[in-house]
Amino acid sequence: MGERRKCVLYYMLVRSLTRSLWNTVRVEKRTLASEPSKPQPVEKDGVDAVQLEALDRDICLVVDEKDNFLGTATKRECHKVGDDGKILLHRAFSVFLFNKRGDMLLQRRSSQKVTYPDYYSNACCSHPLYLDDKAEDVITAARRRLHHELGIPLDHMDPELFTFMTRVHYHDPGDGVFGEHEIDHVLFFQGDVKVKPNSNEISEYCFVPKSEFNAYLPTLEGPITPWFNMIRRHRLKLWWDNLHRLKELAEPDKIHKFMTENTK
C-alpha cells in the first residue's frame, strides 16, 4: 500500500474516532432543562398556548435602520412574514454568557418556540418591550429574560457586568410564516451564575470551552439560529479571545449588516 493511501486511511480513522468521542462527550455535557418539556395546550395557528399569549401580549419596539424608536407593535406583528416577504424592523438583543473560566453557554430553543424551534443558540435572545408608557432599557430587558428563560436570579446579574458590544441589522425569513428582521443589540456577560432553565423556553443547555467549540458544533442534533451563526462567523472568535478587554473592542454606536446563513 502506498504511503499516500496509508495517510488518507489514517486520517479517515482519526476523524471517525474523533466524531465518536465527541458524540460521547456531547451526551455527558448537555443538561436537560429543569423539568422535562411537557406537551402544552395548542391553540390557533398550531402555536403553544404559553407562547401564543406572549405573541399578543408583548409590545415590541419598532425602529428605523438607524435604530430610532418609531412606535410599537405586538410580538406577532413584528415576526409575521408579509405576503411580500417583508417583516417589521424592531429592536432586539442577544446575550452571550460566559462562566469565569471563559466557557460559553449554548442553549437549545424548545420545540414550543414560535420562531426557530429546536434550534441551538447563544444564552438568550429576545426583545426590550414598551412598558409603563416607555421603551425598556436593553440591559434591563436582558436581565428580565435571563431570569425568565434561564432562571438566573436578578441579584446575580449586576447591570455593570454587561458589555454592550455592538448592534447588528439582519433579516431572516424563518419558516415563511414567522421570521426575524431586527436591529440586535449584542451583550456579553461573564460570571458564575446559577442556571435553572424554563422548559417552555429551553430544552437543553451546556457550557462549551473555546478550545472545543468548533469541534462541538458538528455534533449538534439540529441547526443553529441565523443570528448566532452570523455573529459566530463575523465576530465571536475575536470577542471570545478577548474577554479580558471587551470594552476596548466594543462598538455600541455602530450598526453592522451581516449576511445570515441558516447552516450549522
Image (cartoon, helix red, strand yellow):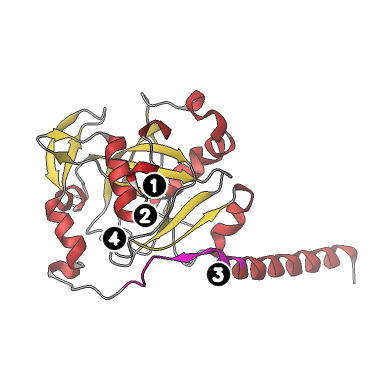
Observer-nearest residue: 149 or 251?
149
Mark 2 lies on residue? 150
Mark 4 lies on residue? 175
The image quarter containing residue 149 is bottom left
Asked if the residue under mark 1 is in contact with the one under mark 4, i.e. CB atoms within 8 Å, the reply is no
Q: CA distance from mark 3 to mark 2?
A: 20 Å
Name the kind of residue labelled 3 in the image. Val
Residue at the image position 28 percent from the left and 66 percent from the top: 112
Mark 3 lies on residue? 27
Nearest to N terminus: mark 1 or mark 3: 3
Name the kind of residue labelled 2 in the image. Leu
Observer-nearest residue: 195 or 5?
195
Observer-nearest residue: 51 or 47?
51
Nearest to N terminus: mark 4 or mark 2: 2
Residue at the image position 16 percent from the left and 49 percent from the top: 58
Q: CA distance from mark 4 to mark 1?
A: 15 Å
Pinpoint residue 42: horizontal percent, then vertical percent: 18, 72
Observer-nearest residue: 82 or 120?
120
Asked if the residue under mark 3 is in contact with the one under mark 4, i.e. CB atoms within 8 Å, the reply is no
Q: Residues within 10 Å of mark 2 (few under 14, many from 20)?
A: many
Q: Which residues are magenta?
A: 25-37
The image quarter containing residue 128 is top left
Taking the magenta stretch, the answer to whether it contains residue 33 is yes
Mark 1 lies on residue? 227
Q: Quadrant of the N terminus?
A: bottom right
Viewer-nearest of discs 1 and 2? 2
Residue at the image position 12 percent from the left and 39 percent from the top: 72
Viewer-nearest of discs 4 and 2? 2
Dot 4 falls on a residue whose secondary structure is loop
In the image, residue 61 sits, relative to residue 228, either above or below, namely: above
Pinpoint residue 158: horizontal percent, then vertical percent: 38, 36
